[in-house]
Image (cartoon, rainbow, N blue to C red):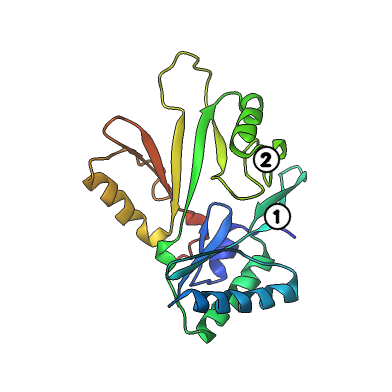
Amino acid sequence: MDMLGGSQIAEAGLTDWRKLAQGLHARYLVGDFRAAVRFVTAIAEAGAAIGHHPLVAIGPGYVHLELVSNDAIYREADGTEHVVEWVTQRDVDLARQITEIAADHELVADPASVSVLELGLDTARSATIAPVWAALLTGRPEAQGHGSPSDEVRDPLGRVPNLWFGDTDEHDDDPRQRFHVEVYVAPEVAEQRIAAALAAGGTVVDGSGAPGLTVIADQDGNTGIVCVDTSAVKKS
């Protein structure tokens, strides 16, 4: 099934869901664990009908859901096809059903609270070093390029954050930071997240990509990036 572009996701009008990194994310507030299980059971029944299910995490007072297809088709300009992990129409359809199920269970969505953490490593030799990181992070060689046409390391078991590689020139003796964290947040909380980091003593070192990418440095110069998938935001 074809992967969906950001504008297609935005036009779907999924009010409870936010596009973060590769998937759609939603968080619903629940009164207790039993309510969470009843909700997830209803979702399981809906998913079984179409042969697709979300990733589920249950915590104190919430159920967190991620929808992503592991068989989405990405086509390059020359027509070359890749099977990737991304949002498809199947995910959008199930997201709508889950929203209806949540309403039936009288659950409230908390879309502003969803967040995804990924790791970034700047390198000129991703194909060379990726096997090391695939082994170190996951113990599985197939994690290199899993669900991606790049060398990105993604754990098929979902135990650790994704590690992607940013292109850079060779700099064997260059002290520049190579590792950084990327925090994907809902569009409506990006400004607040940045303001909180600045109030804590951080500084914006690169805002040229804002609001999609804002690079924040701590007092020691270590950087992290606040990320928003602006392509999946419906224009008002």
The residue at 62%/38% (across/down) is 152
Instruction: Give the quadrant of residue 57.
Output: bottom right
Q: Quadrant of the C terminus?
A: bottom left
| Mark positioned earlier in the residue sequence (1 or 2) | 1
Foreground residue, 92 or 53? 53
Look at mark 2 in the image and give the residue it sits on.
143
- Residue 98 to residue 126: above or below: below
Q: Position of residue 186 (x, y in %)?
A: 43, 59
Q: Amino acid at mark 1?
A: Asn
The residue at 75%/60% (across/down) is 1
Foreground residue, 73 or 143? 143
Evaluate whether residue 119 shows in this view.
yes
Q: Amino acid at mark 2?
A: Ala
The residue at 29%/30% (across/down) is 220
Foreground residue, 93 or 76? 93
Residue that protrudes farthest toward the top in the picture:
173
Q: Position of residue 222 (x, y in %)?
A: 35, 32
Look at mark 1 in the image and give the residue it sits on.
70
